[in-house]
Amino acid sequence: MSIFKQLHLITSHQDLAFEKKIEKLLKLGLNTFHLEVGAICQVKGRDYQINYLASRGPIELSVGDTFDFKDTYCRFTVEHGQATAVANVTHSEFAATNCFKKYGLNAYIGVPIYVDKKIYGTLNFFSKTSCKRDFTNKDLDFISVAAQWLGGELERRHTLKRLTRRSEALSSISQLASIGYWEVDLKKSQLYWSRQTRKIHQVSENYQPELASAINFYKAGTDRDTIIEKVSECQLTGCPWQLEARIITTQGQEKWLSVYAKPVMQEGQCIRIFGAVQDIHSIVMIRSELQKKRVQAEQLLAARSSFLAKVSHELRTPINGINGMLHALKDPSQSARFDEHIQMALASSDTLVALINDVLDYSKLESGNLTLESQPFDLFRLFKEASANYKTLCEPKELEFLENYTALKGIWVESDKIRLKQVLFNLLNNAVKFTQQGSVKLSGAINLDRRLEIQICDTGIGMEPSVLHNLFIPYHQADSSMARKYGGTGLGMSIVAEIVDLMGGQIKVESELNKGSCFNLTLPLTIIEHRGRDEVGVDLYATQNNFCDFAALKVLVVDDNEINRMVMQAMLTSMEVQCDLADSGQQAINLCKQRDYDIIFMDCAMPEMDGMQASAFILQHKKDKAPKIIALTAHTSAQDKQACYDAGMVGFLSKPVEPDQIKQALINSEILN
């Protein structure tokens, strides 16, 4: 009888205990290989322990003996990951090992044993005398098959132990946690339910479940189909599974269950499935209710963001009237007192605009609608503009404004100029606001990674560690007294952090109470080759002061709000520009039929016919003498701007509008002519 047939008879014997099978397997190996000792050893870290042992005569080894794993031949077997055999160690690489020197083992054959796909140890046979023959491929195949059976049987026993422990634990807590146990014996076609499982299904204690009918407790449709699919899948693959499904109890009650299953495989076939069920109906109901609450909360959050955006939009019209009329009324010939009052009013108006912009920006950030718009610009000039603005603000406080960004001269970049300016101005504004004496310093340079490095330092009040920790949290300020003294919404720094993150940069801050703060930013920018030229090849800054005579321009202002029309007319008049006024898109079209305009300032949000529709119509019917149309709107999103450009507009001004913005729009329009 072949050794494989003998091995099969041993492993498939149903009435033979596992330990007895091990004993017979080891003896079969000893007789086959004519070696002295056979063993099953387990690797435990650096230790190598004998768990099962057989011999052909007296030996000095016993079960439980432990050796240093690196001093064994099995180390090579585990490293190779396959059956390894040496008939005469004297003439092999094994001769140089401590195992040979210490124990003088001259013959060896071994193979790794894997349990749960992890190394368990080895099945090996060895002898102090050399093997009388060389080991053959048949020998290697035999010991490999034996190891595969051992691995599967050990895995099954480990699984049974784990499930037994789990079953004992489940028995003790099943009443509290409503967890039941079940087992399917596929060989005997038997199904077992624990008392708690019966209780969950609302059947009597003497109820005997059957394989054919038990599956029908699961609700017809997706639940039942999924259970059937999972049971079939685990029988084929041996993979455990867990899912949630609904049952209909014998009393007609629908329940949500959590079902867990663990198959037991033998020789590639599933012979048993152990599992547990838990009544989680109340948990699912609570979870469903929480999901509804979460959706409601998200809807409320979206509504709040929408509300803030709407409020910001509605407030822009009266602010535009206040700000614009104050600019128009400002006259150097008036008394110093009158001019002072106007300056104060303008400062208040500018502050109000800044606060509203903060709210609007944060609303966009919360809703994910804040986007970046890339454009080429002179980096040095942007820093120079920031310096000029805040150097002036430092003068009344006798603060020294320090500059260190000459390395940026001549560097043009492509990025979102507006957002970069917003970050710079916000940080500089805080530096000046919170510094009563000493200095504020602005530094800028391009590092070796071609990224912009910005540093803004001050000698101001500084921050405690707790304030630093919450610095970029929305609506947070140091304390109520700080808010009363310095004002602000608490949104500024969180907006800065969000914009920096959106731009792919980093911001860090170092601060010490009463000694000042230092902000360090690193931003990725695209450095472009051309310098000092815009996209049409004209240096706008060099030409800005060369086109200040706008008297010959024919301008039309279109806005359904009378205050806005008066504001625009007043500011244009101060620039010696005469303009016509239209209160609707249709009136603008009628005026364009009667006269050719060079520039049209077009409000976008108007009833009946909006600015985009009116612009598209005018440009279509004035192809030969098409005016330059500039959007004038309180809507500032990227989608709004794109809609304006799609309608043929060439510029975009957001309310409230400053005189310098109008002046620059007129200059740009002349350049583009």
Image: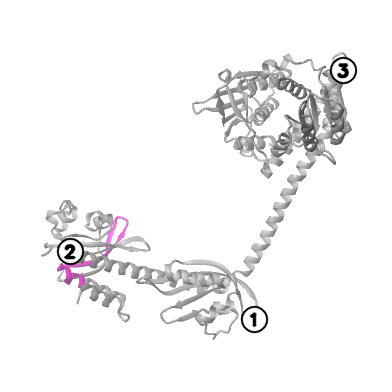
State the mark number for residue 251.
1
Quarter that holds the N terminus: bottom left
Q: How many residues crowd around disc 3 within 10 Å: few (fewer than 14), some, or many (20 or more)?
A: few
Residue 593 vs 545, above or below: the answer is: below
Residue nearest the observer in this picture, 18 or 673: 673
Q: N-terminal of the two: label 1 or label 2?
A: 2
| Mark 3 to mark 2 CA distance (whole Å) | 112 Å
Q: Measured from the top left, where is residue 564 in percent x and y?
A: 85, 31
According to the image, label 2 marks what residue? 136
Q: Which residues are magenta?
A: 28-50
The residue at the point 80 percent across, 29 percent down is 601
The residue at the point 83 percent across, 27 percent down is 556
Q: Measured from the top left, where is residue 425 in percent x and y?
A: 68, 27
Q: Amino acid at mark 3?
A: Arg
Residue 65 vs 449, above or below: the answer is: below
Quarter that holds the C terminus: top right
Residue 40 in magenta stretch: yes
State the mark number for residue 574.
none
According to the image, label 3 marks what residue? 337
Could you say whether the residue bearing mark 1 is in a helix, strand or loop?
loop
| Mark 3 to mark 1 CA distance (whole Å) | 89 Å
| Mark 1 to mark 2 CA distance (whole Å) | 66 Å
Could you say whether the residue bearing mark 3 is in a helix, strand or loop?
helix
Image depth: mark 1 or mark 2 in front: 2
Label 3 close to label 2 by CB (< 8 Å): no
Q: Is residue 271 left or right of residue 629?
A: left
Label 3 close to label 1 by CB (< 8 Å): no
Q: Amino acid at mark 1?
A: Gln
Q: Measured from the top left, where is residue 318 in percent x and y?
A: 85, 33
Residue 479 visible in image: no
